[in-house]
């Protein structure tokens, strides 16, 4: 029994959440079961107050392993040494300590909390080799790090040729990502709109499946 601790709604449509849900879907193939426990999403640092409630819910699941999502790690840091079930902790890192969406005092405070949360972890699973290198450079122990890169879904069959994407212009651009503010897609569209007429024009967004999944 694996209890996966994340932040907010586990069915959120971003890469990290999709990655975790694929882990949960495939766990029975390895004789395991994954259950989610969520830290309530709220502005920093309010989720810290939910730590005792989250750990009570964890205890009720009677897990064999705690899998700690990096976006929730810091919020449990003060509570893990005192109240967590006495089972191994594995942290799954999609971002460096302090995250990628904030800066200044908040990022520094969150980085300290994240590192505190990782102290009891038996393993630290990094989503890429580049992230693992950054984590080691930041002081996390290389001996406890393992790289588990995202897989991808393979199309059942090739699609039709895309045709002439340039449509008479000098270049065509493809941007792949979820339609969320921090991906910078609106900035990209604004930049493209300022190019001379001979360069790309903007087209309508296409909805596609995220490649951020586990094979």
Image (spheres, helix red, strand yellow):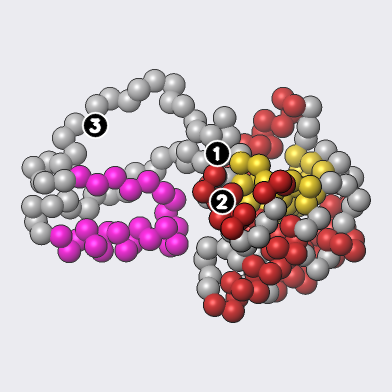
Label 3's element?
loop
* Whole-number angstrom distance, CA of label 2 to CA of label 1: 17 Å
**Residue 147 higher or lower than 158, as above or below:** below
* Labels 2, 3: front one: 2
Q: Is residue 178 rendered magenta in the image?
A: yes
**Residue 45 higher or lower than 184, as above or below:** below
Q: Is residue 113 rendered magenta in the image?
A: no
Q: Circle 1 sits on which residue?
A: 150
* Whole-number angstrom distance, CA of label 1 to CA of label 3: 26 Å
- Quadrant position of residue 83: bottom right
* Residue 85 shows in this picture: yes
Q: Circle 2 sits on which residue?
A: 133
Give residue 181's position: percent from left, percent from top. Answer: 43, 62
Stretch in magenta = 172-195
Label 1's element?
loop
Residue at the image point whose x is 65% and y is 74% from the top: 109
Query: Any mark on residue 162, and which?
Result: 3
For the image, the number of numbered tags is 3
Residue at the image point whose x is 45% and y is 62% from the top: 182
């Amino acid at each position: 029994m694996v209890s996966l601790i994340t932040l907010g709604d586990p069915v959120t449509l971003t890469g990290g959440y999709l990655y975790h849900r694929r882990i949960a879907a495939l766990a029975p193939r390895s004789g395991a079961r994954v259950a989610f426990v969520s830290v309530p999403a709220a502005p920093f640092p309010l989720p810290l107050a939910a730590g005792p409630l989250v750990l009570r819910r964890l205890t009720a699941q009677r897990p064999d392993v705690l899998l700690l999502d990096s976006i929730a790690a810091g919020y449990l840091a003060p509570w893990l040494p005192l109240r967590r079930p006495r089972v191994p902790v594995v942290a799954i890192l999609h971002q460096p300590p302090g995250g990628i969406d904030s800066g200044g005092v908040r990022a520094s405070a969150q980085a300290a909390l994240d590192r505190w949360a990782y102290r009891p972890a038996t393993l630290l699973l990094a989503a890429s080799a580049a992230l693992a290198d950054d984590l080691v450079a930041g002081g996390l122990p290389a001996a406890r790090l393992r790289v588990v890169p995202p897989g991808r879904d393979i199309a059942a069959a090739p699609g039709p040729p895309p045709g002439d994407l340039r449509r008479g212009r000098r270049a065509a651009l493809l941007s792949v990502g979820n339609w969320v503010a921090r991906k910078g897609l609106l900035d990209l569209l604004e930049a493209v709109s300022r190019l001379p007429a001979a360069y790309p024009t903007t087209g309508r967004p296409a909805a596609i499946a995220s490649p951020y999944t586990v094979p």
